[in-house]
Image (tube, rainbow, N blue to C red):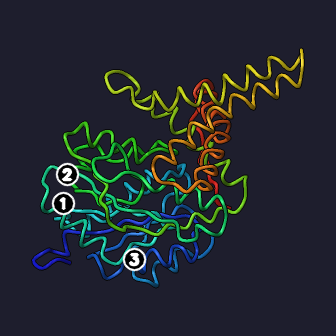
Amino acid sequence: MPEGASQARVGAVAIGRNEGERLVRCLESLVGRVEHVVYVDSGSTDGSVEAAQRIGAIVVALDTSIPFTAARARNAGFDRLAEEIPDLRYVQFVDGDCEIAPDWLEHAQAYLEAHDDVGVVAGRRRERHPEASIYNRLADMEWDTPIGPATEIGGDALFRVRAYLDAGRYDPTLIAGEDPELCLRVRRAGWQVLRLDHEMTRHDAAMHHFSQWWTRATRAGHAYAENFHMHGGAPERYRAKELRSILFWGGVVPAAAAGLAPFTLGLSVVGAAAGFGVLTQRIYRYRRDHGDAPADARLYAAATAVGKLAEMRGVAKYVADRARGRRGGLIEYKG
């Protein structure tokens, strides 16, 4: 901790489900660096609870009769942490598949101490093994977001407790997109959200199969649709742009191409290829303008274009669930 900083005002909440060695690395990067570490387990069967206890974390095991969500887990962890540290001022949330960088906590706390209007900060998240698969590489590129004021951050961040409470905490009903949704409410409560140019976490996506990547994109589409339904009104029109893109490229273009199939299959295929070719080239130019190597830009552009179909599937799932009057279950991409 910086000289004069109070360790007792900072705690950490890690969440996980069957993360194995990833969880061990996560907790070992936290224990001893903050006053208390709370690990919230969502029904693991791989010995995660016992491993967390051996490392020295306080364990909260969620009631398995209630549907699991990351948001619910984080809120439960915060409540337990606040019991241990009544004067808690900052809380580091982290996913159990991430390892905190050695000096992140000190750097992030010092920044919040010096900037009273900032409610939450995140830093650089990197993929642990980007070379292991194209899907890990895509995740690593996804984490490379602009430095400075942000509209959203992911599940790894240091929150000012007052901002977290002012915003109304995580929405425990959300099965995806809970972090951007909370950031929206943090900003509406008058706090800034910032991404710092500092190493924060190493993430282990462990994606080695197309089906994992496809499921992850499906979950993203579901989150966009639900976030728009919650906050899509004027003036911000939250997630309206993303949803329009999904509906057009993942819905209208394939439907138009399919409409040509009864007349000529060849024209249908050409029409679909032409449409997605336009999108791919547009994304490729954008990534090249932002410094990607040609091979990386091509990979990202192709994956984003194909991903519109998976995202459309997530949107359709959300709409179908609402029509049936039910909430969807977790969409998990890890085995």
Point out the tag, 1 or 3, that comes first from the N-terminus: 3
Which amino acid type is shown beneath numbered disc 3? Ala
In this figure, which residue is indicated by the disc labeled 3? 57
Residue at label 1?
112
Residue 171 vertical position relative to residue 68 in the rendered view, above or below? above
Q: Residue 262 or 238: which is nearer the viewer? A: 262
Q: Nearer the viewer, residue 275 or 208?
A: 275
Q: Residues within 10 Å of mark 1 (few under 14, many from 20)?
A: some
Type of residue at label 1?
Leu
Q: Is there a contact, CB below 8 Å, between mark 1 and mark 2? A: yes
- Identify the residue at horizontal 69%, vertical 24% (top origin): 253
Q: What whole-number distance in Å separates the C-alpha atoms at marks 1 and 2?
A: 6 Å
Relative to 158, say whether 254 is above or below: above
Element type at mark 3: loop
Residue mark closest to the camera, 3 vs 2 = 2
Check whether the beta carbons of the residues at disc 1 and disc 3 lie within 8 A of each other: no
Point 28% across, 75% down: residue: 34
